[in-house]
Amino acid sequence: MINQKDILSTIQMIQQQHLDIRTVTMGISLLSCSDESIKRACDKIYDKICRYAQKLVPVCEDIEIELGIPIVNKRISVTPIALVAAACTTADYAPFAEALDRAAKNCGVNFIGGFSALVQKGMTDADRNLIRSIPDALSRTDLVCSSVNVGSTRSGINMDAVALMGRVIRETAEKTKDRDGIGCAKLVVFCNAVEDNPFMAGAFHGTGEPEKVINVGVSGPGVVYNALKDIRKEPLDVVAETIKRTAFRVTRVGQLVAQEASARLDTPFGIVDLSLAPTPAIGDSVARILEEMGLEVCGTHGTTAALALLNDAVKKGGVMASSSVGGLSGAFIPVSEDEGMIAAARCGTLCIDKLEAMTCVCSVGLDMIAVPGDTPAETISAIIADEAAIGMVNNKTTAVRVLPTPGTKVGDTVKMGGLLGDAPVMEVHRESSADFIARGGRIPAPLHSLKN
């Protein structure tokens, strides 16, 4: 039974503590759109997305007004385009991205994800075509997001794909340099990618998903931060219990919105993603939560332990609040999108090596990190390989989204605005990894992958 205290508490979370629904994402299967003719395939894609998602934005806006709960983003995810485009005879897949972009704009959504390929064990001709088309696709569109899964616990790491992605990221940065390399902000490289993630840039509609589905991503770093301010100097087990209770309340809000959107759009409800997704706004930062636990600055010794506590408590509290939890579900640490992370990076306490250690215990990886514009493609590939190894060995999702904006150097700032924020350019190791990346092949799956 919901009492008056619960209602007032939720209102306070929304009005004063930055609680919002970060995204309502409609997943749409495009498998029925395959065609030998790229024009016919693109026409089918555009028509199907518009038919299914035409009411997504108006319905979400109605829910916002009726429930008083902000829904920051309305998004669409689709079947990985490498699968849909495989029937076509062309090698240039950028027209598929343009069709997605037109459909997204027609529906009024913020982003559309799924210009994607799953190559953890090897690459088909269609996978190679899609990956090579990414720089053009992201330079010629505004709302399209792209992802490539290069590894998994079951399959190991496809190092040929890792090497290729380093070059693709550099080329994408070059082709969008007039916009501060923003194409790279819409491109993520995964290990153990999940099929029901509602967050961009990595969202795609997996082949095990229904024809269409509604997935919701909640937020709430500000709510957790304010809850911890009331228990300063309490033991860490009290901190964990407080976060669990707070995550429960935040997730209940997400469950309510998901059910309403599902019913009104006549679309099955998929999952609620529990991830704490920060923003550049003051008071909406994961880093500030860690500092509230007792760290002087995020990135100092103890940061990984504090983040592990936070991530675990969020999962434990949230999983009891929803009938279906999925996606990534953890604490995000995107540098450019988190005011506290930006401050810690600028003062030098937070570095890439520390961020890599933190990704061992949270979602989802090295995210929205600006690196010098002259960073070699092989170094970017090596960063991807390191992060994929963490995901593969620990049986968790990890990812890399780096921004090697041309012309930038350590100490500069890459400005993207909005939820993407501003990224201080961070130092990378200058020693070469080129010979390691040039070996190619596969890093075999770990022994514990043999679970049958």
Image (cartoon, rainbow, N blue to C red):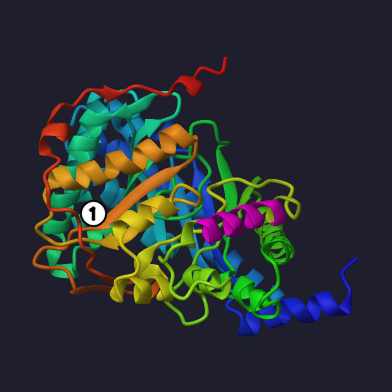
Report the front residue among 267 and 12.
Answer: 12
Give the residue at x 23% y 38%: 131
User: Does the stretch in magenta take in 22?
Assistant: no
Q: Main secondary structure of the magenta part?
A: helix
User: Does the stretch in magenta take in 313?
Assistant: yes
Q: Which residue is mark 1?
A: 138
The image quadrant of residue 32 is top left
260 sits left or right of 429 in the view: right
Query: x%, y% of residue 364?
Result: 45, 51
Mark 1: which amino acid? Leu
Task: Using a 10 Å C-alpha cutoff, classify the residue at mark 1 as few (fewer than 14 neighbours), some (14 to 19) or many (20 or more).
Answer: many
Up-down relation of residue 142 to residue 360 (above or below): below
276 sits left or right of 151 in the view: right
Query: x%, y% of residue 411?
Result: 19, 73
The image quadrant of residue 223 is bottom right
Query: x%, y% of residue 135?
Result: 18, 49
